[in-house]
């Protein structure tokens, strides 16, 4: 049985004070029926690890380098993240792909580094509005998953989470209908089944397009949606906990 995961991507937001307040609010609410992970900006990762010690809350980073070490100014390796106590990392987010030119090949290399360092890789896939309007959403998502399916081992897949982000629904207030989301999640699961029935059964696929407490119940009730990659709503304790309770 796949356990629901609610992952809060803080993006380039928060402060030391915010980090303390957000994590205290989540911890004070007690254990939830779902698995919870938070992804603060790099400067607050160590603080987040300290504040969540002894709890079930996992802490992850929003990105990592595709190199182990060396003269790569401004980069952070997967091994460094593991060293400070992070357990997860988001890779291939649509903002990384669109704003920083990350290709499917780069995402694959980052995924390999994350897995080698003992991190769970939350790999993002998804189509733009233009691609959906052209009816190309399955082609795009299939291409984004293809290298992972070809290059990673069955053992690797035990530490991968897929997050489907309809790019047109991120930060816009728009949300794919539960039916649209389920259709794409089912398609992703079929792609995984093409590699292995076990991988298809065990891999969690999250929905990542403007998840809110108001729509979480309907989204999470879909058979192939295993939780959410939450953006803006993860910066509001009450809203985030509402999603967790869904």
Image (cartoon, grey):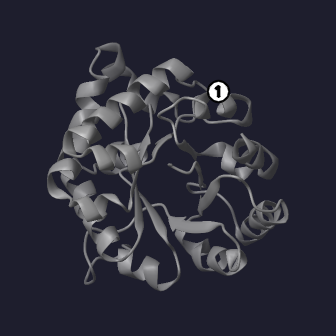
Q: Residues within 10 Å of mark 1 (few under 14, many from 20)?
A: few
Number of numbered discs: 1
Say whether residue 77 is visible.
no
* Front-most of residues 151 and 60: 151
Left or right: residue 87 versus residue 53 is left
**Quadrant, the C terminus:** top right
In this image, 108 relative to 226: left or right? left
User: Which residue extends farthest left?
Assistant: 150
User: What is the x, y in percent for residue 162?
Assistant: 40, 47
Residue at the spot 73% in from the left edge and 36% down from the top edge = 213
Determine which quarter of the picture holds residue 232: top right
| Image spot of residue 160 (x, y percent) | 37, 57
Q: Is mark 1 on a helix, strand or loop?
A: helix
* Residue placed furthest toward the right: 28
Residue 243 horizontal/vertical position (percent) = 70, 42
**Which residue shows up at 33% across the image and 35% down it?**
188
Q: Which residue matches tag 1?
A: 218
Residue at 72 percent across and 77 percent down: it is 51
Give the image quarter of residue 109: bottom left
> x and y percent of residue 98 in the render?
35, 42
For the question of whether residue 151 can be seen, the reply is: yes
């Amino acid at each position: 049985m796949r356990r629901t995961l609610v992952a809060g991507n803080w993006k380039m937001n928060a402060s030391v004070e915010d980090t303390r307040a957000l994590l205290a609010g989540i911890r004070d609410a007690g254990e939830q029926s779902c698995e919870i992970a938070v992804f603060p900006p790099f400067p607050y990762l160590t603080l987040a690890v300290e504040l969540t010690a002894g709890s079930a809350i996992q802490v992850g980073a929003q990105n990592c380098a595709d190199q182990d070490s060396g003269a790569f100014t401004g980069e952070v390796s997967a091994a460094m993240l593991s060293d400070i106590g992070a357990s997860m990392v988001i890779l291939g987010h649509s903002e990384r792909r669109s704003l920083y030119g990350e290709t499917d090949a780069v995402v694959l290399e980052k995924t390999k580094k994350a897995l080698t360092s003992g991190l769970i890789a939350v790999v993002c896939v998804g189509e733009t509005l233009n691609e959906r309007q052209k009816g190309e959403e399955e082609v795009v998502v299939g291409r984004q998953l293809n290298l992972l399916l070809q290059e990673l081992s069955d053992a690797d897949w035990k530490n991968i989470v897929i997050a489907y982000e309809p790019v047109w629904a991120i930060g816009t207030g728009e949300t794919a209908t539960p039916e649209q989301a389920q259709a794409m999640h089912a398609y992703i699961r079929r792609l995984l089944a093409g590699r292995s029935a076990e991988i298809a059964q065990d891999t969690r696929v999250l929905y990542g397009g403007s998840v809110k407490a108001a729509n979480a119940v309907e989204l999470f009730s879909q058979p192939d949606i295993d939780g959410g990659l939450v953006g803006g709503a993860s910066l509001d304790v009450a809203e985030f906990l509402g999603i967790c309770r869904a």
